[in-house]
């Protein structure tokens, strides 16, 4: 399968979901996954975030607006849900380039979730608070999309916040797969993760 737009690290895109027998599936639905929330500060990515488990890190080059740019990704998985923060570093503090990067990352997110034309991507303006003291409000875009994995045909649902500041553009993303993508059982955890994301 061709590499999708640069949003999630390769190990996350290749993850396979086990097919559960009905009794085991019902037992899992009755249990709450264990979340071990911790604040992680990324000096390289210049942000702080509240992760539900210890994140793993990856780095790669991505192409945005015809430029090859460095991107880092920290991601933690709980069951079939991925919580991740990606950071693209720009060559200059340029508002136009930040906007181009945000638009490219938004398109990549929709492509990675397998969003179809029949399921439009929903966006709205939100505010992200910086990690400074005092914290500053930063205008951001929330992106929500649903789709079907091109690999194993399981449903997916993505909620992300995109924000640019200085020479960096950030995406805080929650990607739900399988049964969790069909209901709102993780709404509280998603809101907690997004609210706990603060660029420097």
Image (cartoon, rainbow, N blue to C red):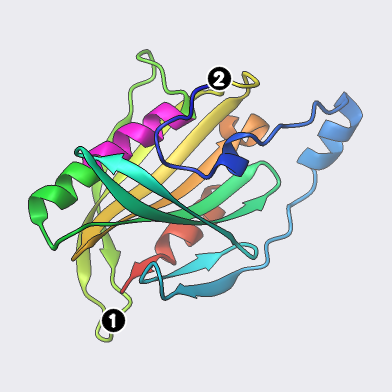
Please give left or right for residue 105 compared with residue 93 in the image.
right
User: Range of the magenta residues?
Assistant: 102-112
How crowded pointer 1 is (Cα within 10 Å; few <14, some 14-19, many 20+) is rated as few
| Residue 80 position in % (x across, y down) | 67, 41
Of residues 88 and 29, the one nearer the viewer is 88
Quadrant occupied by the C terminus: bottom left
The rendered magenta stretch, by its main secondary structure, is classed as: helix
Question: Where is mark 1, residue-wise?
Answer: 132
How crowded pointer 2 is (Cα within 10 Å; few <14, some 14-19, many 20+) is rated as few
Q: Quadrant of residue 1?
A: top right
- Return the residue found at the far top: 118
Tell me which numbered mark, 1 or 2, is placed earlier along the sequence: 1
Q: Quadrant of residue 18?
A: top right
Q: Is residue 69 magenta?
A: no
For discs 1 and 2, the disc positioned in front in the rendered view? 2
Q: Which residue does the image show at 60% across and 62% down from the upper left?
A: 55
Q: Which residue does the image show at 52% across and 73% down from the upper left?
A: 40
Alpha carbons under labels 1 and 2: distance apart = 40 Å
Question: Where is mark 2, residue-wise?
Answer: 150
| Residue 156 position in % (x across, y down) | 54, 30
Regarding residue 184, the answer to whether it shows in the image is no
Regarding residue 39, the answer to whether it shows in the image is yes
Q: Which residue does the image show at 67% across and 67% down from the upper left?
A: 36
Q: Secondary structure at mark 2?
A: loop
Q: Which residue does the image show at 26% across and 55% down from the upper left?
A: 163
Which of the numbered marks, if any, corresponds to residue 155? Answer: none
| Residue 16 position in % (x across, y down) | 71, 32
| Residue 140 position in % (x across, y down) | 24, 54
């Amino acid at each position: 399968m061709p590499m999708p737009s640069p949003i999630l690290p390769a190990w996350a895109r290749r993850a396979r979901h086990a097919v559960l027998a009905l009794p085991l599936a019902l037992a899992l639905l009755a249990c709450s996954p264990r979340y071990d929330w911790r604040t992680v500060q990324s000096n390289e990515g210049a942000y702080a975030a509240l992760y539900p488990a210890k994140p793993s890190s990856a780095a790669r080059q991505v192409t945005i607006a015809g430029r090859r740019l460095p991107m880092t990704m920290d991601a933690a998985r709980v069951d079939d849900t991925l919580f991740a923060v990606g950071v693209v570093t720009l060559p200059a503090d340029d508002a136009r380039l930040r906007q181009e990067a945000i638009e490219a990352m938004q398109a990549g997110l929709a492509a990675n979730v397998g969003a179809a034309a029949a399921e439009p991507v929903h966006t709205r303006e939100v505010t992200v608070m910086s990690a400074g003291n005092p914290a500053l409000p930063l205008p951001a875009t929330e992106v929500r999309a649903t789709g079907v994995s091109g690999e194993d045909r399981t449903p997916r649902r993505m909620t992300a916040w995109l924000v640019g500041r200085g020479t960096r553009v950030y995406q805080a993303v929650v990607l739900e797969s399988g049964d969790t993508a069909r209901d709102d059982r993780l709404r509280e955890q998603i809101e907690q993760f997004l609210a706990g994301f603060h660029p420097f």
